[in-house]
Amino acid sequence: MATKKNASLKSQDLTPPDGGLAVRMYRHGLGDCFLLAFARTPPAKPCYVLIDCGVHMRQKNGATRLGEVMKDVAEVTGGNIDIVVATHEHADHLSGFVQTDGPFAQGKVEVDRFWAAWTEKLDDGQAKRLRARRGAARKVIQAAVKKLKERSDTGLAECLTGLMDFETMPAAAPTTAGAAKTAKASSNEVALELLRQRAHNVEYCEPGAVLKLPGVTEARAYVLGPPRDEVLLKRDTPRKGPGKETYLTARAQQQTFLVAPPFGETLTAEELDRDFRHPFESAVRRKYHFANGPTPRWGRDGLVSKGTRSFCNAHYFKADSMWRRIDTDWLGAAEQLALDLDSDTNNTSLVLAFEVGPVGQGDVLLFVGDAQVGNWLSWRSQRYRVGARTCSADDLLARTVLYKVGHHGSHNATIRRDPLHSSPQNPQGEPFGLELMPSRLIAMIPVDQDAVRKPMPKPWLMPHVPLYRRLLERADGRVLRSDGRPPSDVGVQLEAHSPGTTLARVPGLANVQWRESDAVFKAGSDPLYYDIVFKP
């Protein structure tokens, strides 16, 4: 990498061939940003589509690197983007839009159209309910972290904070264009509002729709997800054996947790006294609270004898006896709530399949955001009609030549089987998703191993090794990672192809070329991007 250019980060051209397109995968680390350039007919400035622009807060120099990415986006597009797509409300997909030193927050990029999922539509009743649930969950988790810190339970507090990383921006949000962050709006919501205000046209995409690209006759976008079916929206995990399904969000323990006394300031005294809202019934409860330090101050209810107080002070409240206490155990439900909040948000990802070429015959580029199992499964019930032709999700998957791997290569964001359609021959479900994609596939994974391996309460397995191995097999080694590391970095002993700095034919593909940027990040020595060019 040391021989690569670093001065001024001057971008290489991103002009697609006639009737084709070019895709730029930015390599800033753990976060998504893809710039697509479609050829117009008659020939003119390409139709530029930007899909997401964010970085995870765990990425080293993430905001700085993303700033360099946005500078390149502005330079390549001439400051005018035809379509900006925001797949879902996570910082590693949206943070760039509100990064204070970025061209979006500063109004230096003009956006013609803004595409978002129906789940972001402000006047949609179902979308409102989903957003209200997510907002309530965020509020309760934040309150739980505060209470855990007050009780010196830093371990669980840090765990919850880590699980909420996808909600946290690596840089401050702007206060321009009326999109200031308030106590009621997350930074991700601010990013969406800024895009709504800046775009000339806003479109909320419904599953089953086919969208036109302005000035482009040889390509179109199929909206695969997210589904309207809330059962599928809540399904985030593959089944673990025959007959087993996982629907995490509606667990009873979470419903109890959401209305727990410390978070129920607006509830009546009668409601707060109900036994089902406490771990123990009222007859055996004792009241106390901490003053300054670990010594409790007992309540004045007359139920605690001097001997009981002496025993508890000696054997329960001493620092070396903290392991005996269950005072904060009930807050453990917040961990599952945080996990489900993350998964539920991922499952609202806007999923687009871009078809390039004749309807029903062209190559397909699949961008899934971070869609998880339920989102994927919903696609099979949809049919797409363009003119006289009708196609299905299975048909689109069978022609997918470029796949943006979901959620940094995690285990539940790339489906391989459809458990809703099984048989004695396929008890785990018939082949679907990745297994339908052709052997001429290229896969792109926005992952950075250094960021993923940072110490945290629950390590992330990204990319998930069995999935990564299967991606390499299906794509015959044509798997591009943001960090550029070989498969052996995660113990996979399969050869992967990598491009040079000049456009060259992709191994095994006749009509596709690729290259690696000859410019590198100032904040590190990694190339700025990969380019993939598809000829008609």
Image (cartoon, rainbow, N blue to C red):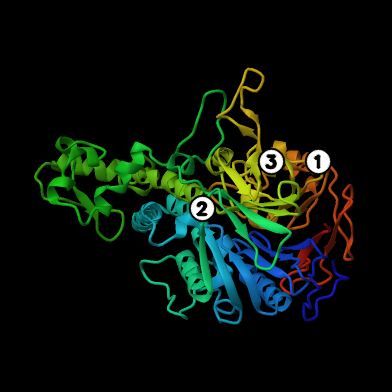
Image quadrant in which the C terminus is located:
bottom right
Q: Name the residue under label 3.
A: 395
Q: Which residue is drawn at 20% across and 50% down?
A: 288
Q: Residue 346 carries which label?
A: none
Q: Name the quadrant containing residue 115.
A: bottom right
Proximity of marks 3 and 1: CB atoms separated by less than 8 Å? no
Which is more N-terminal, label 2 or label 3? 2
Q: Which amino acid does label 3 sit on?
A: Asp
Structural distance between the alpha carbons of marks 3 and 1 = 15 Å
Image quadrant in which the N terminus is located:
bottom right
SS of the residue under disc 2: loop
Residue 246, percent from left and from top: 49, 34
Structural distance between the alpha carbons of marks 3 and 2 = 19 Å
SS of the residue under disc 3: helix
Q: Residues within 10 Å of mark 2 (few under 14, many from 20)?
A: some
Q: Name the residue under label 2.
A: 206
Q: Residue 439 carries which label?
A: 1
Residue 137, percent from left and from top: 38, 52
Proximity of marks 3 and 2: CB atoms separated by less than 8 Å? no
Which is more N-terminal, label 2 or label 1? 2
Q: Which amino acid does label 2 sit on?
A: Glu
Q: Which residue is drawn at 56% across and 71% down?
A: 97
Q: Using the image as rendered, state which of residue 346 and residue 173 is in the foreground.
A: 346
